[in-house]
Image: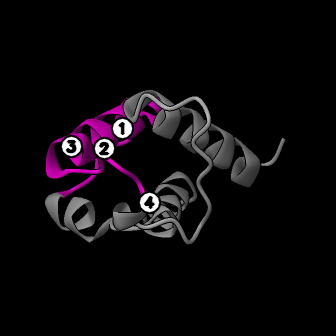
Amino acid sequence: MTDTNKIWNNLNEIFREVFKNENLKISHSTKNTDIDGWTSLNHAILIDAIEKKFSLTFDLDEILTMQTVEDIFKTIESKINS
């Protein structure tokens, strides 16, 4: 499995866990306003879960600019590939 597929599969799993919705389907175009419950608190929980799953740390600027799944994906990908 490529890194891209691993990232995508892990992100789907994390989103389903954080938002407690087994049927949640995210795409690169999914925005924070598209998911019920994507509040500032759940954003923090989401970021924490992503950092743990991928063994990464995001800085404050990165966290604040992650408003879409694409933003999150690109940030993870750039950190993994750097």
Q: Distance between the Cα atoms at labels 4 and 2?
A: 9 Å
Place of residue 21 in the rendered image (x, y in percent of width and height, measured from the top left) = 50, 32
Q: Distance between the Cα atoms at labels 1 and 3?
A: 11 Å
| Foreground tag (1 vs 3) | 3
Place of residue 81 in the rendered image (x, y in percent of width and height, measured from the top left) = 58, 58
Return the disc, 4 or 2, that comes first in the chain's sequence: 2
Amino acid identity at mark 4 = Ile
Report helix, strand or loop for mark 2: helix
Direction from residue 24 to residue 51 in the image, left or right: left
Q: Residue tagged by mark 3?
A: 44
Report helix, strand or loop for mark 4: helix
Is 80 inside the magenta-drawn segment? no
Return the disc, 1 or 4, that comes first in the chain's sequence: 1
Answer few, some or many: residues within 10 Å of disc 4's Cα (few below 14, many 20 plus, some between 14 and 19): some
Magenta span of residues? 35-59
Q: Residue tagged by mark 2?
A: 47
Q: Which residue is drawn at 30% across and 50% down?
A: 38
Quick check: marks 2 and 3 in contact, CB under 8 Å?
A: yes
Amino acid identity at mark 1 = Glu
Amino acid identity at mark 2 = Ile
Q: Residue at x 80, y 48 (%)?
A: 2
Place of residue 8 in the rendered image (x, y in percent of width and height, measured from the top left) = 65, 49
Q: Residue tagged by mark 4?
A: 72
Q: Distance between the Cα atoms at labels 1 and 4?
A: 11 Å
Q: Which residue is drawn at 29% across and 45% down?
A: 37
Quick check: marks 3 and 4 in contact, CB under 8 Å?
A: no
**Which label belongs to residue 51?**
1
Amino acid identity at mark 3 = Ala
